[in-house]
Image (cartoon, grey):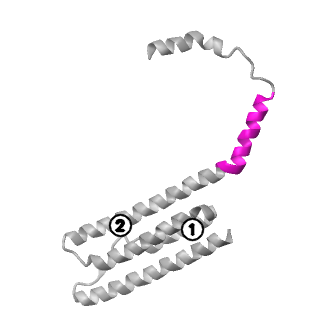
């Protein structure tokens, strides 16, 4: 690298000797402002939306993995939660596919709502009292996750409406 740096220092005076041809600066500024107005914002917006979707997927997956680890250790019934999370994952993917057609604000609000609906710092099964039978717990969990899934599906319907509005 030292030889390369030496050559740059030695010949740097020769690099700045010519003026930029007339009009080049204006054409460059026009092109740059055109890109900012047309494609730049959309590209950045899509990357932001994709990032939000990826974060949401990570949050949901992490919650699922933590819960599954409890199931693997002999705690609880995995089937009800697994079915629920599969359906939530499908909805999340569909909303992410619709993101380019949505406005930034709507997409962010939909993702925030989805996180609020689906996140559980402590899973419901862990909060149920021990005196309930296994069947009672399964029934309560089915109703609980069924209600949450209804909310997720309502949110998906709302997202579809917003996509059609655009």
What range of the chain is rendered magenta? 23-40
Q: Is residue 150 left or right of residue 41?
A: left
Residue at the image position 62 percent from the left and 70 percent from the top: 163
Question: Quadrant location of residue 162?
Answer: bottom right
Split into 4 quadrants, where in the image is the N terminus? top left
> Looking at the image, is 31 positioned above or below residue 126?
above
Q: Is residue 116 left or right of residue 142?
A: right
Residue 151 disc label: none
Q: Is residue 57 left or right of residue 112?
A: left
Q: Which residue is mark 1?
A: 109
Q: Which residue is mark 2?
A: 63
**CA gap, disc 2 to disc 1?**
21 Å
Determine if the magenta segment contains residue 83: no
Q: How far across and how far down the image is residue 60, in percent?
A: 40, 66
Q: Earlier in the sequence, mark 2 or mark 1?
A: 2
Q: Residues within 10 Å of mark 2 (few under 14, many from 20)?
A: some
Residue at the image position 25 percent from the left and 67 percent from the top: 69
């Amino acid at each position: 690298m030292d030889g390369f740096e030496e050559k740059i220092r030695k010949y740097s005076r020769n690099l700045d000797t010519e003026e930029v041809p007339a009009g080049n600066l204006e054409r460059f500024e026009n092109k740059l402002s055109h890109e900012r107005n047309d494609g730049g914002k959309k590209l950045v917006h899509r990357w932001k939306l994709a990032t939000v979707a990826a974060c949401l997927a990570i949050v949901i997956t992490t919650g699922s993995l933590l819960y599954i680890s409890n199931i693997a250790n002999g705690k609880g019934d995995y089937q009800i939660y697994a079915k629920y999370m599969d359906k939530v994952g499908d909805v999340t993917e569909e909303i992410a596919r619709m993101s380019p057609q949505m406005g930034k604000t709507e997409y962010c609000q939909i993702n925030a709502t989805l996180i609020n609906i689906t996140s559980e710092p402590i899973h419901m099964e862990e909060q149920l009292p021990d005196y309930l039978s296994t069947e009672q717990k399964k029934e309560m969990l089915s109703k609980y996750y069924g209600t949450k899934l209804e909310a997720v599906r309502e949110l998906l319907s709302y997202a579809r409406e917003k996509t059609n509005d655009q």
